Image (spheres, rainbow, N blue to C red):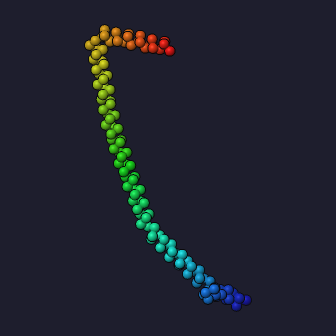
Amino acid sequence: METSVNNLSSNPGMSGKPFASNIDEASAGAHHTIDKVTDAARPAVDRVATGAHQAVDKLAGAAASAAETYDVKSEQLKEAQMRITENCRNYVRDNPLATVGIAVVAGFLLSRFMNAR
């Protein structure tokens, strides 16, 4: 029985070497091939990653610029609204009769427009 176990473990494969040796060589060859493919692909992957980083940086810069512009314009609109409101208050305070007349005419026109439908 021992001879059959010894024969199985040292049974040569097709190349005259034991099976374990053939498996080790195939594994080493596969690792070598993987390393070659990885080394060949690395520059392309690095270029894609660099391009992706640059695109994200550009988008972030554009978004930051847009947000800053939005903040500035928003502040300008608030200031304009405050100026217009103050001008209207001053006009009403300085010209109360004209203001009432404008309000009556606007109400009349609005009611005519709404009734025409």
Looking at the picture, tell me which residue is in the foreground, 4 or 56: 56
Q: List the single residue furthest toward the front.
A: 116
Picture layout, residue 1 above or below residue 59: below
- The answer to which image quadrant residue 94 occupies is top left
Residue 30 in which image quadrant: bottom right
Q: Which residue lies furthest to the left in this view?
A: 94
Q: Please state the horizontal and vertical placement of residue 87, each as a whole percent of the image.
A: 28, 20
Q: Residue at x 36, y 41 (%)?
A: 67
Residue found 33% across the figure and 37% down from its top: 71
* Quadrant of res 45: bottom left
Residue 101: x percent and y percent? 34, 9
Q: Residue at 30%, 28% (x, y): give it.
A: 80
Q: Give left or right: position of 13 versus 40.
A: right
Q: Which of 117 and 84 is in front in this view?
A: 117
Residue with the most extreme bottom position: 3
Q: How many marks?
A: 0
Residue 57 against residue 94 in the figure, above or below: below
Picture residue at 43% right of the left edge, 64% below the top: 44
What is the x, y in percent for residue 24?
56, 80
Q: In which quarter of the image is the N terminus?
A: bottom right
Q: In the displayed image of the protein, which residue is found farthest to the right?
A: 1
